[in-house]
Structures are given as structure tokens and as C-alpha cells.
């Protein structure tokens, strides 16, 4: 439990009952969820050469109320969600039950999990942990050889400070003030370095950009100044030889 910021957990836990309120404190996640689910689905199918999701196991690390878990469960994946916020896990379990979905939810941290998965998701979570490098290793530890690990997070740039903090927290009031700390944002090169040190294969780094005109997020393969995805493959045993 060492790579856990208790204050961060408490910050989100106070709003856990609102995870499924699309106009509540998790509004940005609801806005970006459709495009991130589509992007992740396509990356996973490409990595496994279009193998059906029904044959794959997946864990969403820092799953919150299950915003990513539920769509992938509907797509047929064998989904596990883990989060250190017991309130969020309770909400996730209750909502999945209401939707008739079978999702294995666990209250805890990824370091304590003992299972391995084809797909490991770490969405909007690495910027909230004390030791991002150790967190990356923990995510790779949970991934099967030949599997894929997908991160989404915020870049540490002047633009991300203006949009991710000033605009989102103080002008648009999309998220509660204090949700993000700019110094904890991680640059793509830093994240890629952690992955390569684990012999991971960085497959793609893609941006996700919000358009005020359409009020929607979309994938932008060039602009990684604010939100971005990093998709990494884990080497197989054979590739080590």
C-alpha cells in the first residue's frame, strides 16, 4: 500500500456517490468516455490481431465507479476493476448489478493484486500516485507476456496547466478544485522511459483533444499537449531470448 496517496483517495471518495452523474464532479470522464472506449477497443483488437474481446481478460486500475469497466463488459471482455476507494467500489458493484453486468470488482491497489491479465488499463490514475515509475512496474507485473498496457493521463505543459487546471477547475467547474496537481502530470517521454526500462514496447502515443465547438473529445495523433494515451506491449518469454 506504499504507492497510495491517502489524501488523493479522500478527495475522490467524498464524491463517490456521484460517479454515474454525467453532470456531476466526474463530468469530464463522462465526456471523454465514448472516445477513449473506442480508442482502447481498437488498440486492443489491433494488438491481438483482431481476436475477439470475449477471449480476453482485462483489469482497469483505479476503476472508480466503473465508467470504463461497464462498456468493456458489454463488449464481452472478462473485466476486473480495482480501486482503493471502497465507496467507489460499492457504487461500481451496485451499478453493475442494476445493469445486469458481471464485473469482478476489488477494493485495493494494483500492487496487491495477484492475477495477471491480457489487458491492463490505467486511465487518469498515474498522475495521482506518489511514485509513477513504481506504478508503471506494478501495471506491467499484472500483464501477461504478450499482453498490452494502456495509460491515459495529462502531459506536463503550459497548455495542460491552462486547460487541465485553470479552465477545468476554476472556469468551467468541470471538476472540484484541487483535483489535479500540475507538477504530478507526466510527460510522454518520461512515461515511455519507465516502460522501456521494463523492456516494454511503446506502440503508440496519441493525443485526446476537446473541441468547444462540438462539446466533444476526439483522438488527435499529433497533439499530445494536454490529454494523451500511451499504448505499450509487454514482451513475450520468447522475445527475451
Image (spheres, rainbow, N blue to C red):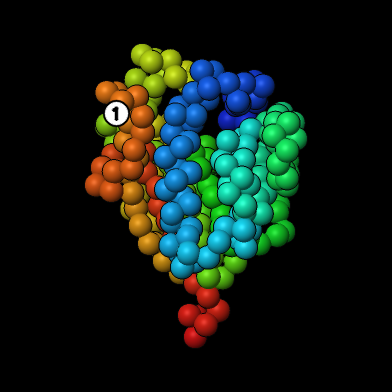
Residue 59, percent from left and from top: 62, 51
Residue 33, percent from left and from top: 48, 36
Residue 45, percent from left and from top: 47, 60
Answer few, some or many: residues within 10 Å of disc 1's Cα (few below 14, many 20 plus, some between 14 and 19): few
Front residue of this view, candidates 181 and 101: 101
Residue 11, percent from left and from top: 59, 24
Going 60% across and 66% down the picture, which residue do you hit? 144
Image quarter of the N terminus:
top right
Q: Is residue 2 above or below residue 53?
A: above
Going 44% across and 29% down the picture, which residue do you hit? 31
Q: Is residue 48 above or below residue 72?
A: below
Q: Is residue 37 above or below residue 140?
A: above
Farthest residue, direction left: 222
Front residue of this view, candidates 114 and 198: 114
Tell me if 123 is positioned left or right of 69 in this view. left
Residue 134 appears in the picture as rendered: no
Tell me if 7 is positioned left or right of 211 in this view. right
Farthest residue, direction bottom: 241
Which quarter of the figure has residue 160? top left
Residue 121 appears in the picture as rendered: yes
Front residue of this view, candidates 59 and 139: 59
Tell me if 74 is positioned left or right of 136 in this view. right
Q: SS class of the residue under badge 1?
A: strand
Looking at the rendered structure, the number of numbered marks drawn on it comes to 1
Going 50% across and 48% down the picture, which residue do you hit? 132
Going 26% across and 42% down the picture, which residue do you hit? 223
Residue hosting label 1 = 211
Amino acid at each position: 500500500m506504499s504507492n497510495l496517496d491517502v489524501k488523493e483517495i479522500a478527495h475522490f471518495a467524498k464524491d463517490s456517490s456521484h460517479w454515474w452523474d454525467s453532470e456531476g464532479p466526474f463530468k469530464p470522464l463522462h465526456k471523454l468516455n465514448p472516445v477513449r472506449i473506442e480508442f482502447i477497443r481498437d488498440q486492443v483488437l489491433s494488438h491481438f490481431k483482431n481476436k475477439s474481446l470475449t477471449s480476453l481478460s482485462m483489469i482497469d486500475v483505479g476503476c472508480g465507479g466503473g465508467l470504463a469497466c461497464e462498456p468493456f463488459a458489454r463488449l464481452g471482455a472478462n473485466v476486473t476493476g480495482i480501486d482503493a476507494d471502497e465507496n467507489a467500489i460499492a457504487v461500481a458493484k451496485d451499478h453493475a448489478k442494476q445493469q445486469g453486468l458481471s464485473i469482478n470488482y476489488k477494493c485495493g491497489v494494483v500492487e496487491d493484486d495477484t492475477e495477471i491479465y491480457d489487458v491492463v488499463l490505467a486511465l487518469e490514475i498515474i498522475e495521482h500516485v506518489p511514485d509513477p515509475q513504481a506504478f508503471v512496474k506494478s501495471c506491467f507485473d499484472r500483464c501477461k507476456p504478450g499482453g498490452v498496457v494502456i495509460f491515459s493521463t495529462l502531459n506536463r505543459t503550459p497548455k495542460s496547466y491552462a486547460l487541465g487546471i485553470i479552465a477545468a477547475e476554476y472556469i468551467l467547474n468541470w471538476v472540484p478544485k484541487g483535483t489535479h496537481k500540475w507538477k504530478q502530470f507526466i510527460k510522454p517521454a518520461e512515461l515511455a522511459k519507465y516502460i522501456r526500462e521494463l523492456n516494454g514496447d511503446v506502440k503508440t502515443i496519441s493525443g485526446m483533444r476537446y473541441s468547444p465547438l462540438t462539446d466533444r473529445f476526439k483522438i488527435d495523433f499529433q497533439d499530445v499537449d494536454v490529454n494523451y494515451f500511451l499504448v505499450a506491449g509487454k514482451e513475450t518469454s520468447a522475445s527475451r531470448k
